Amino acid sequence: MSWIRVGDTFNSAPEFMRAAELAVEREDARLVSEIKGWTMALYSYSAQQWTDYRIGYGALVEIIGLTRAHDALQDLIKIGVLRDVSTDSERAFALVERESFIHIIKSTDKKMAAKRKRDMNKGSLQIPVLLRDGDQCRYCGIEVNWNDRKNDEGGTFDHREPNEETTPDNYVVCCRGCNQLRAELGGDAEEELPLLDAPDEPIYGKYIMSKLSKWRRIVTRTCRQMAIPNPLETTERAGTRHPDPAQASGPTATSAPTTQSQELAGTQSAIDPQFPARDNDDRAGRAAKETPRDPAPSEGAPTSDHDHPRTPAPTGTRQPDSEPQDDTTTPAAPGARPANEPTRPVRKRRRARRRSR
Ligand SMILES: [Zn+2]
C-alpha cells in the first residue's frame, strides 16, 4: 500500500507562492490550482510506484497529458517542485523532498521496515541479543519497558549497521529515546551516544523470559555457545511455581535493596545460589544481580563460600544447606567488569546527559 502525507503548510509552501506570482504575471487565474493538482498527482504516482520522489519523463507526460506536459514541466521546475536529474540514458525529474510539504515513504524505508519485522521474528538473532543485553538499553543503561510502544522508555532494537546484514553483533537492545536520538544525531551518534559494554549480569524481565520460553532450543544452544547459565532452566530448577514465565503474575519489582532481595531469595538460594529467584519472581536475572556474589574467578579469587563472607541473611530466613556452586558460569560478557562492581552509576550519568540535551 502506498503512503502519502500532505503537510499542513502545503498551501502556503514557497513553491505555490512562486506559482501565484507566475499566475499574476500571465493573468492566468487557474494556474495555481492546476499546479497544485499536478503536484499532488506526481507525488501520489511516486508513492504508489515506489519511485522515491523520482518521475520519469514518460510518466510525467502520462500524468499531465501530452498537450500540457511541456509547459507544466517548465513551470514545475521554475517554482521548485521539480528538479531535472536527467542522465545521458534517461530523462527524469526529482520531486522536492520536504516533510512539511508532501512526505511519501521511500522504497528503502519500506524495505527497512520489512527487514525490521523479519528480524523481530528471528529467534537466532533475538535470543543472543536478549541474553547478552537483557532489559538494559545499551546506550543509556536504563531498564526498558517492552510493553511501552510510545514513550522513551519503550524497548526497541537498534541495528547499528543498517546497510549490513543484521547479526547479533550489530544488533542491540535500545530504549526508544536513544534510538530516536541516535537517528537525529546521524554521524555524531557514535560520539554523542556511544555503545556501553553489555551488562555483566543482564536483567531478564517478563517480556524477555516469555520470548526465551518461545525459543527454548535456540536458548539452550545459545547459552551453551555463550557459556552462560540458561535462565529458563535456572528459573525452573529454582522451583518457580510458573513453569512458563509468561504466566507468572509476580510483582514487577523495580529496584529492591540488596538485603531485601537476599531476604526474599533466602528460600531459593539453597537450590541455586546463582539465580536465587524469589517466589513468583520472573526476574531471575535481577535477583542474581542484587545478590552479593563471589568475585569472578578471573580475578584469581577463591570461590569457596567460606573464604569471603556474604551479606548475612536476615534472621528467620533459611541459609543455604548445600555448598553453593562457584561462579565459573558467570556470563562471559565482552569487557566484563568484576561482578561486584556497581553498574548503576553509569546508567544515571547517561540518563542525566540525555535529559540535559
Ligand atoms: Zn537508552
Image (spheres, rainbow, N blue to C red):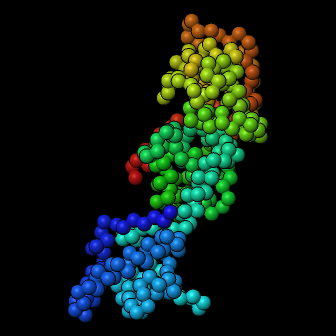
Q: Is residue 299 visible?
A: no
**Residue 252: image x %, image y %?**
50, 27
| Image quarter of residue 128 | top right
Q: In this rendered view, identify the residue nearer to me: 28 or 166.
A: 28
Above or below, 104 against 39 in this view is above
Question: At which x and y percent is residue 334?
Answer: 69, 44
On the image, the x and y values in percent for residue 192 come to 50, 55
* Residue 16 visible in rendering: yes
Q: Position of residue 222 (x, y in %)?
A: 74, 40
Q: Along the line of sight, which residue is nearer the eye, 156 or 200?
A: 156
Judged from this view, the residue extending furthest toward the top is: 316
Near-viewer residue (171 or 121): 121
Q: How many marks?
A: 0
User: At x 63% / y 51%, what residue is drawn?
Assistant: 119
Residue 61 vs residue 136: left or right? left
User: In the image, what residue occupies the spot 56% across and 35% down?
Assistant: 207
Above-or-below relation of 190 to 238: below
Q: Residue at x 71, y 27 (%)?
A: 233
In the image, residue 9 sits, relative to residue 278, either above or below, namely below
Locate residue 323: give its quadrant: top right
Q: Is residue 40 above or below residue 173?
A: below
Horizontal side of 281 relative to 103 (left or right) equals: right
Residue at 53 percent across and 24 percent down: it is 249
